[in-house]
Amino acid sequence: MSKEAKNEGEGNRTADREYREAATKHAQESDTQRQARDAAETLDETKGNKDLKDAEQKGKSHAKGPASR
């Protein structure tokens, strides 16, 4: 971010660009498939945890298309 924070209002292009750059860097430098498997295993191990199951269902309700595993 620049020295002077400039209010760009709704649709902040600077924040959008910075987010996209960080997300791309993470995807390129991380083993995202392994992270997804680890997260799925964690959910499987804690099936009795109602809060996690509720959060999973809420997330799935926002997904576009079929859930894949």
Image (spheres, rainbow, N blue to C red):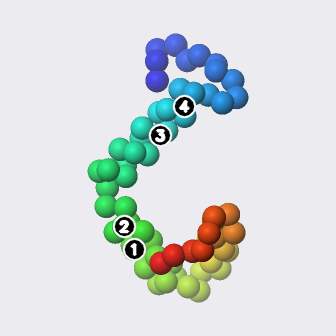
Question: Image check: 37 left or right of 5?
Answer: left
Residue drawn at x 67%, y 63% as measured from the top left: 62
Q: Please give the residue where the numbered disc 2 appears in the rendered image.
A: 33
- Front residue of 63 and 59: 63
- Front residue of 16 and 48: 16
Which amino acid type corresponds to the residue marked 4 in the rendered image? Ala
Which amino acid type corresponds to the residue marked 1 in the rendered image? Arg
The numbered disc on residue 24 is none
Indicate the position of residue 55 as horizontal and vertical percent values: 64, 69
Q: Earlier in the sequence, mark 4 or mark 3?
A: 4
Mark 1 falls on what kind of element?
A: helix
Mark 3 falls on what kind of element?
A: helix
Residue drawn at x 36%, y 67% as measured from the top left: 33
Q: Please give the residue where the numbered disc 1 appears in the rendered image.
A: 37
Question: Image check: 29 left or right of 51?
Answer: left
The span from disc 1 to disc 3 (Cα, nearest Å) is 23 Å
Which amino acid type corresponds to the residue marked 3 in the rendered image? Arg
- Front residue of 49 and 66: 66
Mark 4 falls on what kind of element?
A: helix
Q: Please give the residue where the numbered disc 3 appears in the rendered image.
A: 20
Label 4 Cα crowd, 10 Å radius (few <14 / some 14-19 / many 20+): few
Which amino acid type corresponds to the residue marked 2 in the rendered image? Gln
Mark 4 or 3, closer to the camera: 3
Label 1 Cα crowd, 10 Å radius (few <14 / some 14-19 / many 20+): few
Mark 1 or 3, closer to the camera: 3
Q: Earlier in the sequence, mark 2 or mark 3?
A: 3
Res. 64 visible in picture: yes
Q: Please give the residue where the numbered disc 4 appears in the rendered image.
A: 15
Label 2 Cα crowd, 10 Å radius (few <14 / some 14-19 / many 20+): few
Where is 2 relative to 39, above or below? above
Residue drawn at x 42%, y 38% as measured from the top left: 21
